[in-house]
Amino acid sequence: MSNNANPFSLFLILILLVLSTDNQAEVKLGFIRGLIDQTSRSLGSLREGITAMNTSFEHARIMFMNSNNEPDDTK
């Protein structure tokens, strides 16, 4: 019989056991929840910024590639 316990699950159990012995566990969990929410929002904003930057680069690439392929009128 093999024990295939996920290390993350074991860590979560350890954290819950530690918090269960703490008098301010609810305050600490609220802080962690806020931290996770802020991190999630920050990563969402970062993702949107990278997507907008990529779109701008794609437009610039298309614009410059098309201008290089047009015939030269200054002969």
Image (spheres, rainbow, N blue to C red):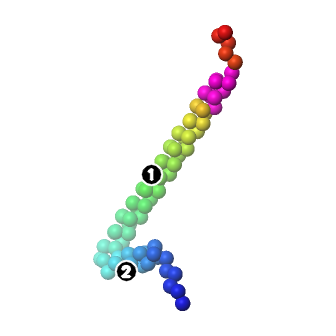
Q: Nearer the viewer, residue 23 or 42?
A: 42
Q: Residue 5: horizontal and vertical position, in percent?
A: 49, 80
Identity of the residue drawn at 36% across and 64% down: 31
Q: Which one is earlier in the sequence, the residue at label 1 or at label 2? A: 2
**Looking at the image, which residue sits at the far top?**
75
Circle 2 residue: 17
Left or right: where 9 falls relative to 67: left
**Highlighted magenta segment, given as a residue range:** 62-70
Q: Residue at x 30, y 77 (%)?
A: 22
Q: Which image quadrant for residue 13? A: bottom left
Identify which amino acid the numbered label 1 is placed on: Ser
User: In percent of the image, x 35 and y 76: which residue is there?
Assistant: 19
- Which kind of residue does numbered mark 2 sit on? Leu
Measuring from the top left, give residue 1's x and y in whole percent.
54, 90
- In the orientation shown, which residue stands out farthest toward the front? 75
In the image, is residue 63 above or below residue 39? above
Secondary structure of the residue carrying numbered label 2: helix
Residue 42's tag is 1
Q: Position of residue 74 (x, y in %)?
A: 65, 10
Q: Main secondary structure of the magenta part?
A: helix
In the picture, residue 17 is in which quadrant?
Answer: bottom left
Q: Is residue 59 visible?
A: yes
17 left or right of 53 in image? left
Mark 1 crowdedness (10 Å alpha carbons): few <14, some 14-19, many ≥20: few
